[in-house]
Amino acid sequence: MFANYLIGLREGLEAALVVSILVAYLVKAGRRDRLPVVAGGVTLAIALSVGFGAFLTYTSTTLLKDFKSQELFGGIMSCIAVVFVTWMVFWMRRTARNLRSELDGKLSAALNVGGYAVALTAFLSVFREGLETALFFWSAVQAAGSTTSPVIGFSLGILTAVGLAWLLYNRSVKLNLARFFTWTGAGLIVIAAGVLAYAVHDLQEAGAIGGLYTLAFDISGTIPPSSWYGTLLKGVFNLSPQTTVAQAIAWTLYFVPVMTLFVLGSRRAGTRKQEISHA
């Protein structure tokens, strides 16, 4: 539940910030008449993102009748989700500082073209976030199992993000967004590592990868999957008490280099910021 709350909070806040920047620019430019157009583009982007998530669920549960085909589809989609989210985590850290000026420039150019261009700018800005969120959330739900906790956690995260974005827009609260995206980005990398390990398990069950019964460790006697702490570890770290060698290798090969690059990049960015402030 916590992992899906973090996904909803992080991805929801990214999308909400994009919308608030677009709205703030139109208000500042005295073009409130274009707000309904932006709302239309955002609504369409959200609807298509939800539809994409529904399509993934329909495909995995209805279109694909064979168990191995379902596992293969789930494994491939989860791998794509991990690549997508990893790229977005690094992209957001690099561009967050210039996001407002970038969106302002795009919307300014769209205003000169017309209403359709404004709607398209709003749609594309939000749809990218929505598509990523739908794919990653779907993968996380597959890894968590068929319970309602992921949906509840994700919904609470989205609601928190919308409320936080509203407070930021009205300047009711201040938030160090660089620090927020750094910590939540690290959290998403932990979650993505677990999703990747589960994707490998799916691919093993589909027969695409061998070693399904070759375990790296079995701690199910110490951490029963049905226990509260087993559920907690599963929900936060996607830890499987029975982890295969292939899963352990995939988790390590992803987590160690990606987290190292992310932490080192964040430290360099912080050092540059201090140098600029002291110049």
Image (cartoon, helix red, strand yellow):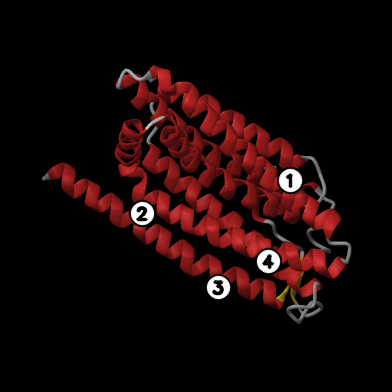
Q: Quadrant of the N terminus?
A: top right
Instruction: Tell me the element at label 2.
Output: helix
Asked if residue 207 is positioned above or below residue 195 in the image, the reply reads below
Q: How far apart are the alpha carbons under marks 1 and 3?
A: 31 Å
Residue 143, given in percent of the width and then of the height, sits at 73, 56
Mark seen at residue 192: none
From the viewer's side, name the closer residue of 238 and 129.
129
Q: Quadrant of the C terminus?
A: top left
- Give the amino acid type for the residue marked by disc 2 in the picture: Ser
Asked if residue 243 is positioned above or below residue 146 in the image, the reply reads below
Quick check: can you spot residue 191?
yes
Residue where numbered disc 2 is placed: 266
Instruction: Tell me the element at label 1.
Output: helix
> In the visual, does 252 lie left or right of 272?
right
Among numbered discs 1 and 2, the one appearing first in the sequence: 1
Mark seen at residue 76: 4
Foreground mark, 1 or 4, reads: 1
Mark seen at residue 54: 1
Residue 213 figure quarter: bottom right
Q: How far apart are the alpha carbons under marks 3 and 4?
A: 18 Å
Asked if residue 74 is positioned above or below residue 14 in the image, the reply reads below
Q: How far apart are the alpha carbons under marks 1 and 4?
A: 17 Å
Residue, x 47% and y 69% (percent of image)?
257
Q: Are marks 2 and 4 in contact (CB under 8 Å)?
A: no
From the viewer's side, name the closer residue of 113 and 222.
113
Instruction: Tell me the element at label 3.
Output: helix
Q: Are marks 3 and 4 in contact (CB under 8 Å)?
A: no
- Give the amino acid type for the residue marked by disc 4 in the picture: Ile
